[in-house]
């Protein structure tokens, strides 16, 4: 059985991706920053209901050593690592003049350094296996920029460069690496936005609605599937036509 790791998978887009990959037949290693993140939801039960193996691995993905340790444990428990979804992410929004250095550094380390950490360690396992799929969560903010998100858009733009670099470095070992760039998806992360900002965003979306987490999971499922075997180094925007 093939194994998928999804970071930041206790809720939101990560949980939807985990559930979809379980439906696709992958054994699932769920990561989030603490085991307690899984206490008040039924994601583990929903995954096990698909008849696949599921384990919870608490680690702060911005921390290099914690990622190394987690990847070792997952490899030992599951035997292989076939798909890595770098999903964990945070926002600490604010206009540039008011953004603290602490909030800049925090977002860069959780959103961007985590991709370096996890790709390095899970990628090493995939290289030995001579195959694997890596899927990174970027954002339209990384492609087009967004006022109030200097830190977040920097991290998400960097992920695009990292995706292309990974595709080039690991391609000869049969590993693909792609990114998805969601627009406005209904999750706890976007629930923090003001009503005024939500209304302004809605006005710009061609489909005139926010995205659903399952709509991100469907594209990730494709990128993890055999049908996407010749797709690498790409960024797929999933935004309902937000930025045409
Ligand atoms: P979310 O609901 O806030 O979920 C993110 C998850 O990541 C949470 O469970 C969070 O745990 C976890 N996490 C945070 N820091 C972590 C760390 N250091 N190590 C491990 N896990 C950590 O966010 P979402 O909306 O599902 O977003 C998922 C991804 O999609 C993010 O990368 C985000 O930037 C990207 N994205 C989202 C949207 C959108 O509209 N929602 C749009 C574009 C891109 P805690 O609960 O403890 O914080």
Image (cartoon, rainbow, N blue to C red):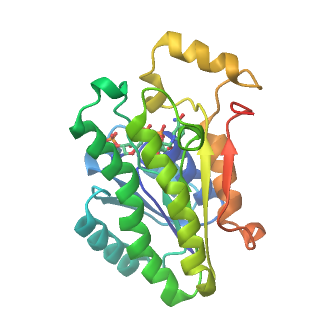
Image quadrant where residue 104 sits: top left
Q: Is residue 221 left or right of residue 86?
A: right
Whole-percent x, y for residue 174 in the image: 63, 83
Residue at left 53%, top 87%?
A: 129
Residue at left 51%, top 31%?
A: 146
Residue in the foreground of this view, choosing between 76 and 48: 76
Residue in the foreground of this view, choosing between 82 and 53: 82
Whole-percent x, y for residue 215 in the image: 67, 41
Residue in the foreground of this view, choosing between 150 and 240: 150
Which residue in the rendered view is the most extreme toward the front?
A: 97
Whole-percent x, y for residue 30 in the image: 42, 58
Residue at left 56%, top 51%?
A: 17
Question: Can you tell me which quadrant of the image ligand 1 is in?
Answer: top left
On the question of residue 145 being in view, the answer is: yes
Q: Is residue 1 above or below residue 104?
A: below
Q: How many marks?
A: 0
Q: Is residue 191 left or right of residue 201?
A: left
Whole-percent x, y for residue 45 in the image: 46, 50
Q: Is residue 190 above or below residue 172?
A: above
Image quadrant where residue 154 sits: top left
Q: Is residue 4 above or below residue 183?
A: below
Residue at left 30%, top 56%?
A: 62
């Amino acid at each position: 059985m093939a194994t998928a790791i999804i970071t930041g998978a206790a809720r939101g887009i990560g949980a939807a991706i985990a559930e979809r990959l379980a439906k696709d037949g992958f054994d699932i290693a769920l990561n989030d920053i603490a085991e307690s993140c899984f206490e008040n939801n039924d994601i583990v039960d929903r995954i096990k209901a698909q008849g696949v193996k599921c384990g919870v691995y608490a680690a702060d993905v911005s921390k290099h050593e914690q990622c190394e340790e987690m990847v070792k444990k997952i490899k030992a428990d599951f035997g292989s690592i076939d798909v890595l979804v770098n999903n964990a992410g945070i926002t600490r929004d604010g206009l540039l003049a008011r953004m603290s250095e602490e909030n800049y550094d925090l977002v860069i380390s959780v959103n961007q350094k985590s991709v370096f950490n996890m790709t390095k360690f899970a990628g090493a396992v995939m290289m030995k296996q001579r195959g694997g799929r890596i899927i990174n969560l970027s954002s339209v903010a990384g492609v087009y920029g967004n006022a109030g998100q200097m830190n977040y858009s920097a991290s998400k733009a960097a992920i695009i460069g990292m995706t292309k670099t990974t595709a080039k470095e690991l391609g000869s070992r049969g590993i693909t690496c792609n990114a998805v760039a969601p627009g406005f998806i209904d999750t706890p992360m976007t629930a923090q936005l003001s009503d005024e900002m939500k209304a302004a965003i809605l006005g710009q979306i061609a489909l005139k609605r926010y995205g659903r987490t399952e709509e991100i999971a469907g594209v990730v499922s494709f990128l993890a599937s055999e049908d996407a075997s010749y797709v690498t180094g790409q960024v797929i925007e999933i935004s309902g036509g937000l930025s045409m």
